[in-house]
Image: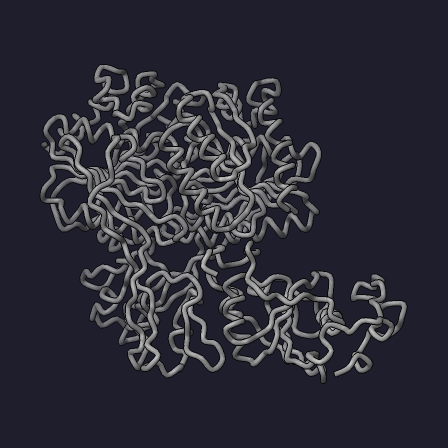
């Protein structure tokens, strides 16, 4: 898909989030001179860690412990919600979450932080990983930002593990 | 919010006393939240002026339960358990303190008489202090899964921290190197290692430093009672240098510390001019610089 | 305070106390770290051995075993402590995913179109092996710790040490206990030094003990933790005396005695701060051997006599 067809949030002045707080406008892709990051790869079943069941809910930045995943077809914007049964696990929540997401056929995961074990699991299924969502965004806002290339793709497990699992074992 | 965890390997070298003192000093200029993850024997609330304001029961332990109405006494579960948690008496007896909640016994029971369920294994206590609250974990007597209770304490502490916009979360860690320590270290920005000049303390320091090293977080060292044995002290300093640890400071043996603790206060509050208080003040400043440098 | 195991009924207690031999077992524990458990354990062990009692000391503080350091003895006769980890046979695996679902630690992951693999931390429970219908999972071994047996001057020291970074300390405690208990017939008495705290590793280390010495200090922390450990010992139906170490530290010795009395512990041994103890500690020799006339040595010798008399040895 080429640049012209990428969706942008309505209004050049930006938009308001759920608390009616004004969010500055993101740059309109069409006005940029450089290729957006994901144009041709934009279509995917993207799984976003969420605190609630619909796309208006706030995202949850912790992949393994998020209560829900929203699996969104970025082209059609059709979405499916799945409860994260692994969130309550004592151990290995990240890997459990990765299994759920993989079994649902996701192509990519968008979250705040994906720990080393979850990273390895997702990669074994060929799932791409993007990090950097903010706890202030809704799922819908995060998808929009994703399509504009706002999030970095994670291509190696972290040297420093995050809030969750992995215990930073060196054998990554 | 920067998260600093205070560990030692060896128990009794002064983690809680130091956490209370550092917390008090740092709170003069920053919003500091304290957490006590030594859930077996939480002592931090005793080292400062605190008042219990809230608590929450936590069920972070899974245990297997045998339904004796269905049990046929075949003892398959006794054979299956890898943790020696089931003993064969007239009927199989489940020892909850040895049960890891893995469910292997439930899977192999021919009568489907075993079920794994979560049980209450402790609580989280919230104490009010003169500054931000103190979030402390407390394991039930005879309870297990301290590591998972520590996870819950940290989670609650982070929530409180976000709520009060704390700048620093200072965590009093458990002794040892096992799963409660690993749980205490997970996700932290910096590990402050406390030791004292003795062969045992150095031995345990090396072991806990290895565990903290897996997390590749910043590490700093404080030597407590630094003047009690010069030879061991030099060995520790050499070890710290060799392993790239920040040397945050040394505190000489000072009777003011136990005296302050006996009166339920951190030494920097009870005896602000004591040599230990002055050293801890320097350590607080050095610690902040070190943490800022790695985060 | 909720006690999850307040309903540990008599069956469990009986099972806790069950042992296959007659040699008496004395546990040494403390709740608070750094109160001097290991120092007490080592000195009592030496005092007994020096009286001709065939003594075994089990260092079950697997996170940080320091008995050997206090005795200045090398760790010898190493035996690895392993747990099972699953090894999946590609030929036999049918990718049904039962093993992934059986693992409560979420350690196994089955990628799309591939066979399950071990990604997370495995605790050796073997649930995956038990559910695998094609029998495609074999038992690999992963070392999580070591046990050792060292002998010094009539004393046998069994040490358990967890490999730093692993979480399976209970398996290592079990292993060192079993190693020592396997040799129980060789000894007149077995002493067990536990880790600090009141969690499952402490309880597992005290399985089979006949009596337990609770070591504490008079500080507020010591008092608080003494109460916890005595509650635990009561729950496990374990009696014994209290050792009040560093009795002259700023604190409240009377409170210690009150609490001990409330838990039916009438016998309290007091040890004051002792320079000679500190010196012998620095020299790596137990004080009962280095300075047998030191004030602390006298108490250790009395405790040893008391234990020997109690068990007729």
- Kindly tell me whether residue B35 is visible in this rendering: no
As drawn, A65 above or below B43? below
As drawn, C100 above or below C195? below
Q: How is the image coloured?
A: one colour
Q: Name the quadrant containing residue B105.
A: bottom left
Q: Name the quadrant containing residue A146.
A: bottom right
Number of marks:
0
Percent coordinates x, y for residue C47 in the rendering: 18, 26
**Direction from residue A20 to residue C271 in the image, left or right:** left
Residue drawn 40% across the image and 35% down it: C32
**Direction from residue C312 to residue A170 in the image, left or right:** right
Percent coordinates x, y for residue C137 in the rendering: 31, 74
Q: Nearer the viewer, residue B202 or B173?
A: B202
Percent coordinates x, y for residue C33 in the rendering: 39, 35
- Kindly tell me whether residue A153 is visible in this rendering: yes
Residue drawn 29% across the image and 21% down it: C280
Percent coordinates x, y for residue A80 in the rendering: 64, 80
Residue drawn 36% across the image and 52% down it: C5
As drawn, B46 above or below C290? below
Q: Nearer the viewer, residue B210 or A137?
A: B210
Q: Nearer the viewer, residue C149 or B17?
A: C149
As drawn, C306 above or below B187? above
Q: Nearer the viewer, residue C29 or C87?
A: C87
């Amino acid at each position: 898909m080429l640049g012209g067809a990428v969706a942008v949030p309505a209004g050049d002045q930006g938009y308001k989030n759920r608390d009616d707080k004004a969010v500055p406008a993101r740059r309109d892709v069409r006005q940029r001179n450089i290729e957006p990051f994901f144009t041709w790869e934009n279509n995917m079943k993207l799984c976003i860690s969420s605190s609630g069941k619909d796309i208006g809910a706030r995202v949850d930045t912790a992949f393994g412990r998020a209560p829900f995943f929203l699996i969104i077809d970025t082209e059609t914007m059709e979405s499916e919600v799945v409860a994260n049964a692994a969130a309550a696990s004592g151990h290995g929540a990240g890997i459990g979450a990765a299994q759920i997401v993989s079994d649902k056929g996701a192509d990519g995961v968008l979250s705040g932080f994906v720990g080393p074990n979850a990273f390895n699991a997702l990669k074994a299924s060929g799932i791409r990983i993007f990090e950097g969502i903010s706890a202030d965004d809704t799922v819908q806002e995060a998808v929009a930002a994703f399509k504009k290339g706002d999030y970095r793709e994670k291509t190696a497990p972290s040297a420093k593990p995050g809030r969750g699992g992995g215990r930073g074992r060196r054998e990554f | 919010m920067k998260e600093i965890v205070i560990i030692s390997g060896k128990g009794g070298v002064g983690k809680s006393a130091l956490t209370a003192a550092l917390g008090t000093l740092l709170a003069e200029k920053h919003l500091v939240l304290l957490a006590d993850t030594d859930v077996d024997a939480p002592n931090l609330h005793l080292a400062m002026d605190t008042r219990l304001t809230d608590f929450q029961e936590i069920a972070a332990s899974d245990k297997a339960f045998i339904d004796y109405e269905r049990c046929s006494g075949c003892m398959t579960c006794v054979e299956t358990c890898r943790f020696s948690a089931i003993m064969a008496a007239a009927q199989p007896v489940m020892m909850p303190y040895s049960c890891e909640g893995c469910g292997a016994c439930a899977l192999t029971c021919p009568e489907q008489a075993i079920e794994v369920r979560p049980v209450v294994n402790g609580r989280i206590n919230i104490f009010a202090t003169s500054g931000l609250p103190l979030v402390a974990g407390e394991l039930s007597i005879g309870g297990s899964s301290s590591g998972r209770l520590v996870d819950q304490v940290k989670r609650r502490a982070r929530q409180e921290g976000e709520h009060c916009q704390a700048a620093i979360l200072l965590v009093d860690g458990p002794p040892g190197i096992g799963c409660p320590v690993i749980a205490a270290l997970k996700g932290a920005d910096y590990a402050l290692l406390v030791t004292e000049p003795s062969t045992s303390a150095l031995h345990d320091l090396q072991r806990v430093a290895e565990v903290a090293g897996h997390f590749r977080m910043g590490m700093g060292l404080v030597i407590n009672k630094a003047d009690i044995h010069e030879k061991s002290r030099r060995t520790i300093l050499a070890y710290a240098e060799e392993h790239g640890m920040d040397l945050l400071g040394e505190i000489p043996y000072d009777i003011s510390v136990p005296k302050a603790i006996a009166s339920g206060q951190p030494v920097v509050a009870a005896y602000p001019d004591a040599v230990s208080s002055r050293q801890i003040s320097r350590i607080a400043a050095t610690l902040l610089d070190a943490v800022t440098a790695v985060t | 305070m909720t006690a999850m195991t307040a309903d540990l009924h008599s069956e469990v207690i009986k099972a806790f106390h069950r042992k296959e031999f007659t040699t008496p077992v004395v546990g040494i524990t403390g709740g608070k770290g750094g109160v001097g458990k290991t120092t007490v354990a080592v000195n009592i062990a030496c005092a007994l051995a020096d009286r001709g009692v065939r003594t075994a000391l089990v260092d079950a503080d697997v996170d940080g075993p320091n008995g050997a350091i206090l005795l200045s003895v090398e760790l010898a006769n190493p035996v690895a402590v392993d747990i099972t980890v699953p090894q999946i046979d590609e030929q036999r695996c049918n990718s049904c995913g039962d093993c992934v679902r059986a693992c409560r630690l979420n350690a196994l992951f089955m990628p799309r179109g591939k066979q399950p693999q071990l990604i997370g931390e495995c605790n050796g429970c073997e649930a995956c092996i038990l559910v695998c219908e094609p029998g495609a999972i074999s038992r690999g071994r992963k070392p999580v710790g070591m046990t050792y047996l060292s002998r010094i001057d009539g004393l046998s020291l069994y040490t358990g040490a967890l490999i730093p970074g692993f979480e399976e300390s209970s398996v290592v405690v079990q292993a060192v206990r079993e190693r020592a208990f396997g040799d129980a017939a060789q000894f007149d008495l077995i002493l067990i030094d536990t880790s600090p705290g009141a969690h499952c590793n402490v309880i597992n280390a005290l399985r089979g003990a006949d009596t337990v010495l609770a070591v504490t200090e008079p500080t507020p922390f010591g008092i608080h933790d003494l109460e916890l450990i005595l509650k635990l010992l009561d729950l496990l139906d374990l009696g014994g005396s209290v050792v009040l170490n560093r009795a002259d530290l700023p604190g409240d010795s009377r409170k210690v005695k009150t609490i001990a009395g409330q838990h039916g512990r009438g016998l309290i041994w007091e040890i004051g701060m002792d320079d000679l103890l500190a010196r012998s500690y620095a020299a790596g020799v137990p004080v009962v051997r280095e300075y047998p006339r030191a004030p602390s040595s006298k108490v250790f010798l009395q405790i040893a006599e008391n234990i020997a008399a109690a068990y007729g040895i």
